[in-house]
Amino acid sequence: MRDFWVVFLLIGTMAWAQAKPAASAAASNSKQKPPSAPSVAADAPVLTIKGLCAQPIPNAAAVPASYGCQTVVTRAQFEQLVQAVGADKDAEAKRQLAKAYPEFLVMAHEAEQRGLDKQPRFAEKIRFARLQILSQELMGQIQQEAAQVPEKDIADYYHKHASDFDLANLERIVIPNRTQLKPQSHQQGAEQSKAAEDVVTKEAELLRGRAAAGEDFSKLQKAAYDAAGVSGNNAPNPSMGKMRRRSLPPAHGSVFDLKPGQVSQVISDATGHYIYKLDSKEIESLDAARPEISNTLRGQRMQEMIERLEQPFTTDVNDAYFGAEASVDSD
């Protein structure tokens, strides 16, 4: 759907199209399937614009004269357009194109009658649109080539980055940075904040000791909330399920080095205090990781192709004309 509108943006006509009233949400979300295409002959009309005598479409000579003063778009012609602008992703895209295309033909015909296609500005827009469309076509071809990832490359990546595919079944206790309970003393400001932080820091170490002794993490998480004055969660669930190393904050990744049954030290950062227990660990299979690795390598291959393409070229910009590039204020 995006490709369809991009093409019309490139040729400069979407400013008019976007001014048209938008279709209702119900219509745009419709997923009804169109009639079976094979039931319509290739040379059968699928769009007929009555009153438009000019034929600004491919193979206009093939349209029978019996159609009279009208422009006919056959199934073959329309499907050629559909493929060209990328409107073949779903039925809704085709329907929108079927509505927009006749309007573009009518507007283009009137523009030609007024001689707008003879103006230098039009020629320059066509030249620039050609560059954009060619660039888009090249990017599409590069994407296709990059997607042809050899199976050996996928296997090599899997074995080289084996640790990336570790799956750990984790439990975690979260202790807030400071207690929400009101202090018993008359401490104020920074002293009060420091006292609140000290309370939970000491509690985190106590909870870690209880966790290492084998106490249930659900019970310990509730104790952590109670100590910090957190209410509203009487049945906390510390289980995180199976996770990858990268799913955790970088400073927490060391928990993947624990052995099954081991409990981590208290890990503290700006968001709180954390205690982990590694219940089990396994390595995701190559078959399960294949789609992810393929996507990663496809992106890398595409980037490398583009860099090889652009590497031989450099551009000098005349700052006397464009003005010096504005510096970014790091503050």
Image (cartoon, rainbow, N blue to C red):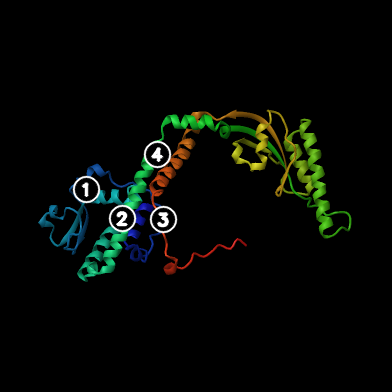
Choose top left, top right, bottom left or bottom right for residue 111. bottom left
* Three-letter amino acid code at the position of disc 1: Ala
Q: Nearer the viewer, residue 290 or 227?
A: 290
Point out the frontmost of discs 2 and 3: 2
Proximity of marks 2 and 4: CB atoms separated by less than 8 Å: no
Label 2 sits on a secondary structure element that is: helix
The span from disc 4 to disc 3 (Cα, nearest Å) is 36 Å
Classed neighbour count for the residue bearing mark 4: other residues with Cα under 10 Å, few (<14), some (14–19), many (≥20): some
The span from disc 2 to disc 1 (Cα, nearest Å) is 15 Å
Q: In which quarter of the image is the C terminus?
A: bottom right
Q: Mark 4 or 3 closer to N-term?
A: 3
At horizontal 29% and vertical 50% (from top left) the residue drawn is 84
Residue matched to label 3: 26
Q: Position of residue 217 (x, y in %)?
A: 73, 36
The span from disc 1 to disc 4 (Cα, nearest Å) is 29 Å
Q: Is residue 114 left or right of residue 199?
A: left
* Three-letter amino acid code at the position of disc 2: Leu
Residue matched to label 2: 97
Residue 90 visible here: no
Residue matched to label 1: 76
The span from disc 1 to disc 3 (Cα, nearest Å) is 30 Å
Classed neighbour count for the residue bearing mark 3: other residues with Cα under 10 Å, few (<14), some (14–19), many (≥20): few
The span from disc 2 to disc 3 (Cα, nearest Å) is 18 Å
The dot on residue 147 is 4
